[in-house]
Image: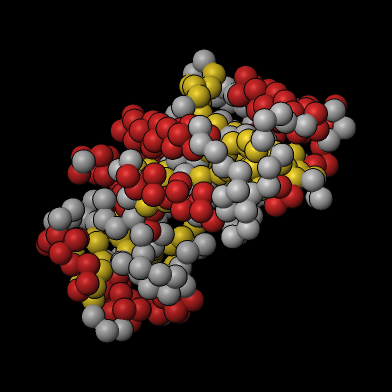
């Protein structure tokens, strides 16, 4: 595994040289893990497990505090670990000033507290997406992990669909999803499950409540797990009751046809915005484009939502090795909504559905 992390840091080093940077300070937890194997999560939003300094001189440093020192030793040479105590910002500023003069940083992640301390001793260069650009294209190790995570997700949803769901609450179903993922080996959820019944299904990110599911109504499920550090994300919309209404069935058919339009169009080199446009044009042709309010999907990997985002303004182009979700949906206030989501790999000859 260390060889994988070293290979990734070498790819980042080439980017640093291209941008004329001496070093790059990595603070985003998923990026830090991707490059080092150290700590995928920070404890909470106002705390940090540490940061990684990648330099063009091939001397990289993992910086952390005493709570994480033993974990750092498991994945990083001890002589290249800097352990700070007390004033994290001030001590980091002093330490980094002896390692480089010009340092790129993740401008979407660095807090003002850290920025204010570092700018006194370093030439800080704001950068965006250097590591994320690497993470967009998955290597075979990552693809295998995503395969396993997606398979668990599929099994959990399939098992749930075979049960009688009428009369149970959204919260009860969400809890069953979580237990099933844990029992299947997942370390945690990729995100809190979305379980939306009846008119609640018109809200794409509905939070499960305690009321009982009505018979003869839609049930939107969107759930995922983290297995071996990699996330899954799948949506299904079911009909609670024996015979779906014509409105539900026709909406489900349109959504699944739109998904097929997208998946059949996927190929390396295609502009993401053009892929999104194909689906909106399909919906427009059926007079329902205004009921498709969100992006077509997103990249997925160490995080549930990763670049590229599959929206109308994306500047990205599809590349072989990207793993994406394709999740068109149609939503009608007062009635409900339908979403259907697959994870796919962009291959040279098209899309492989996980």
Q: Colour mode?
A: secondary structure
Q: Quadrant of residue 272?
A: top right
Residue toward you, 33 or 354: 354
Q: Position of residue 244 (x, y in %)?
A: 72, 31
Q: Position of residue 214 (x, y in %)?
A: 68, 47
Residue 86 visible in the snapshot: yes
Residue 275 visible in the snapshot: no
Q: How many marks?
A: 0
Image position of 340 (left or right of 28): right
Is 155 placed above or below 333 here? above
Is 89 placed above or below 60 here? below
Residue toward you, 317 or 59: 317
Image position of 236 (left or right of 57): right
Residue toward you, 68 or 101: 68
Q: Position of residue 289 (x, y in %)?
A: 82, 37
Residue lying at 54% horizontally and 56% vertically, measured from the top left: 171
Q: Quadrant of the N terminus?
A: top left
Q: Quadrant of residue 113?
A: bottom left
Image position of 345 (left or right of 257): left
Residue farthest along the top direction in this orientation: 349
Is 107 placed above or below 288 here? below
Residue lying at 85% horizontally and 28% vertically, measured from the top left: 286
Is 253 placed above or below 315 here? above
Residue farthest along the right direction in this orientation: 287
Residue lying at 52% horizontally and 15% vertically, measured from the top left: 349
Residue farthest along the bottom direction in this orientation: 86
Q: Position of residue 319 (x, y in %)?
A: 51, 29
């Amino acid at each position: 595994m260390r060889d994988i992390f070293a290979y990734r840091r070498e790819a980042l080093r080439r980017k640093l040289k291209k941008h004329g940077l001496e070093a790059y300070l990595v603070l985003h937890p998923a990026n830090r893990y991707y490059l080092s194997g150290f700590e995928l999560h920070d404890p909470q939003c106002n705390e940090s497990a540490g940061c990684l300094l990648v330099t063009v001189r091939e001397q990289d440093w993992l910086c952390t505090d005493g709570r994480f020192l033993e974990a750092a030793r498991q994945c990083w040479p001890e002589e290249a670990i800097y352990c700070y105590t007390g004033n994290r910002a001030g001590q980091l500023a002093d330490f980094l000033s002896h390692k480089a003069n010009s340092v790129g940083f993740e401008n979407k992640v660095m807090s003002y507290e850290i920025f204010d301390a570092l700018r006194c001793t370093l030439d800080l260069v704001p950068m965006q997406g250097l590591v994320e650009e690497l993470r967009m294209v998955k290597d075979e190790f990552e693809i295998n992990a995503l395969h396993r995570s997606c398979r668990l997700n599929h099994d959990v949803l399939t098992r749930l669909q075979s049960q009688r769901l009428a009369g149970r609450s959204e919260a009860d179903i969400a809890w069953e999803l979580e237990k099933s993922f844990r029992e299947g080996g997942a370390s945690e959820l990729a995100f809190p499950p979305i379980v939306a019944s009846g008119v609640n299904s018109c809200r794409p990110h509905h939070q499960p409540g305690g009321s009982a599911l009505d018979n003869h109504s839609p049930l939107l499920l969107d759930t995922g797990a983290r297995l071996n550090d990699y996330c899954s994300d799948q949506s299904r919309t079911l009909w609670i009751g024996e015979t779906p209404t014509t409105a539900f069935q026709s909406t489900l058919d349109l959504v699944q046809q739109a998904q097929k339009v997208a998946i059949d169009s996927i190929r390396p080199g295609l502009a993401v915005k053009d892929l999104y446009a194909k689906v909106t044009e399909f919906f427009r042709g059926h007079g329902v484009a205004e009921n498709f309010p969100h992006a077509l999907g997103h990249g997925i990997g160490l995080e549930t939502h990763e670049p590229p985002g599959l929206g109308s303004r994306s500047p990205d182009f599809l590349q072989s090795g990207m793993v994406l979700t394709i999740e068109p949906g149609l939503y009608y206030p007062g009635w409900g909504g339908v979403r259907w989501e697959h994870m796919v790999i962009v291959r040279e000859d098209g899309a492989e559905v996980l």
